[in-house]
């Protein structure tokens, strides 16, 4: 995440205790965790919006980082994770007017991006970054909190386990396991690493998680072990690991042919089988730091189905998170083809013989209608896709809605940029786009076109 100031100083944390917070800087998650934050502007830029209206907001969720939604029969609950810990809101009566029903107080929590929930067992998994509670990347403690949401009004910690990684954590194989990655490496890790890979945690007994001693998803950056930022699992069960060096997908269960060895073997969370993927061309993403991804499948596909380079399931959408001086060089949305990457090419890439996916299209917020030209806070961040409309957060440049029916030419169709925007992650839910905004809490948006 972009470097910003959040209220975090650990006094004492017991899993059910409330913490006291003070002001302390937190770091970002991009290229070596991003540049220092720019000083706040003396006057806020005028807001801008088009073809979208705000129908609701949740200002008491200030510090929000990510959202999820759980269903309890007819009851619809929004789970917000952030610097405060966890808050739950009832959306049942009116999805545009969330009602606070529960809270787990953890002031100074960081960073639990892309927080995941178990929709069946009603649990939420919080990744503790080493910078949480006043720590730092070099020596801070990282781990995972398993939080019980059986009663959404009474969230409680079931267990906590130390993990060598702790920036994001992702459900694997029906939330029986977690893959946890990031951030930059600790002092105790090998000097040649560029960042933390993935550690696997068995949570079949959620009160006694077991962390595997050896990490996976190594040698991802042209043979170098590097920063794995996040993992998304597609509708076929392939887990896509994004980070410095591109996006690589794995089977995590079932019998599959390993394209690297040529042998048929059983995939597991601890020993996954490579599927496809690889590096992104530097002409599209110069930083090589891919933040998160999405592979359109079936009726959610934005590529029209069929076969070939744009066939159903043969595209990968990925976000580059990168901050440079000004806006024009900041991270972009990249759409690439997976064609030609199914035979282990992304696992054999070296600096001498690099392998890169073919870029289909890109989109950047720089210079687009509705942007604030005075802001240098323009990196792409999390996104969500529904019915060929991609909604994406761009920090101070707000929330952008793109028509991606033609993957070679994404087009902006709407935008929402408040003057104090710090948009981190949008989510489609019940016809609205819910935006986790670290300054504003949660904005609830509706397309009007």
Image (cartoon, rainbow, N blue to C red):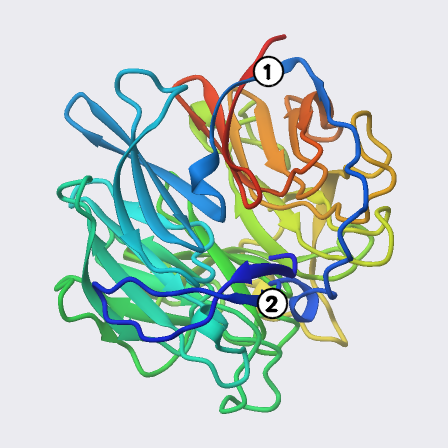
Rendered position, 150 above or below 291:
above
Rendered position, 19 above or below 275:
below
Residue 53 - label: 1
- Name the image quarter holding residue 410: top right
Residue at image location 41% in from the left, 79% down from the top: 141
Residue at image location 74% in from the left, 65% down from the top: 35
Q: CA distance from mark 1 to mark 2?
A: 33 Å
Residue 41 visible to the viewer: yes
Residue at image location 19% in from the left, 46% down from the top: 149
Residue 25 - label: 2
Report x, y in % for residue 432. 47, 20
Q: For numbered disc 2, what is the local secondary structure?
A: strand
Apparent side of residue 114 relative to residue 375 in the rendered image (left or right): left
Q: Nearer the viewer, residue 445 or 354?
A: 445
Residue at image location 58% in from the left, 62% down from the top: 243
Apparent side of residue 383 relative to residue 157 in the rendered image (left or right): right
């Amino acid at each position: 995440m972009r470097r910003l100031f959040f209220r975090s100083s650990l006094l004492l944390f017991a899993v059910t205790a409330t913490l006291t917070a003070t002001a302390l800087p937190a770091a970002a998650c991009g290229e070596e965790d991003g540049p220092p934050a720019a000083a706040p502007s003396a006057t806020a830029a005028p807001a801008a919006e088009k073809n979208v209206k705000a129908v609701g907001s949740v200002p008491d969720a200030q510090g929000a980082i990510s959202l999820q939604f759980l269903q309890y029969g007819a009851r619809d609950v929004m789970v917000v994770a952030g610097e405060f810990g966890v808050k739950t809101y009832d959306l049942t009566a009116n999805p545009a007017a969330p009602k606070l029903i529960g809270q787990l107080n953890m002031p100074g929590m960081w960073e639990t991006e892309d927080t995941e929930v178990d929709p069946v067992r009603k649990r939420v998994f919080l990744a503790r970054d080493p910078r949480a509670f006043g720590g730092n990347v070099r020596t801070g403690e990282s781990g995972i909190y398993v939080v019980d949401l059986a009663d959404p009004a009474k969230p409680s910690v079931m267990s906590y386990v130390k993990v060598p990684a702790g920036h994001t954590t992702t459900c694997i194989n029906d939330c029986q396991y977690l893959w946890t990655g990031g951030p930059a490496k600790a002092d105790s890790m090998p000097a040649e690493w560029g960042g933390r890979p993935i550690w696997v945690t068995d949570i079949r007994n959620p009160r006694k998680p077991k962390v595997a001693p050896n990490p996976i998803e190594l040698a991802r950056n042209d043979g170098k072990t590097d920063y794995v930022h996040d993992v998304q699992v597609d509708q076929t069960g392939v887990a896509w690991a994004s980070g410095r060096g591109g996006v690589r997908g794995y089977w995590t269960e079932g019998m599959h042919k390993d394209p690297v060895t040529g042998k048929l073997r059983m995939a597991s969370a601890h020993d996954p089988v490579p599927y496809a993927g690889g590096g992104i061309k530097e002409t599209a993403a110069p930083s090589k730091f891919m933040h998160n991804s999405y592979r359109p499948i079936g009726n959610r596909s934005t590529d029209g189905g069929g076969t070939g380079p744009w066939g159903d399931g043969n595209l990968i959408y990925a976000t580059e998170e990168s901050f440079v001086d000004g806006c024009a060089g900041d991270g972009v949305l990249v759409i690439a083809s997976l064609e030609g990457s199914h035979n282990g090419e992304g696992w054999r890439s070296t600096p001498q013989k690099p392998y890169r996916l073919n870029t289909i299209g890109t989109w950047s917020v720089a210079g687009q209608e509705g942007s604030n030209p005075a802001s240098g806070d323009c990196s792409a961040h999390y996104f969500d896709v529904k019915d060929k409309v991609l909604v994406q957060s761009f920090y101070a440049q707000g929330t952008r809605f793109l028509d991606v029916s033609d993957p070679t030419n994404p087009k902006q169709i709407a935008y929402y940029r408040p003057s104090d925007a710090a948009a981190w992650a949008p989510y489609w839910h019940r016809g609205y786009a819910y935006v986790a905004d670290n300054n504003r809490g949660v904005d609830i948006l509706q397309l009007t076109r």
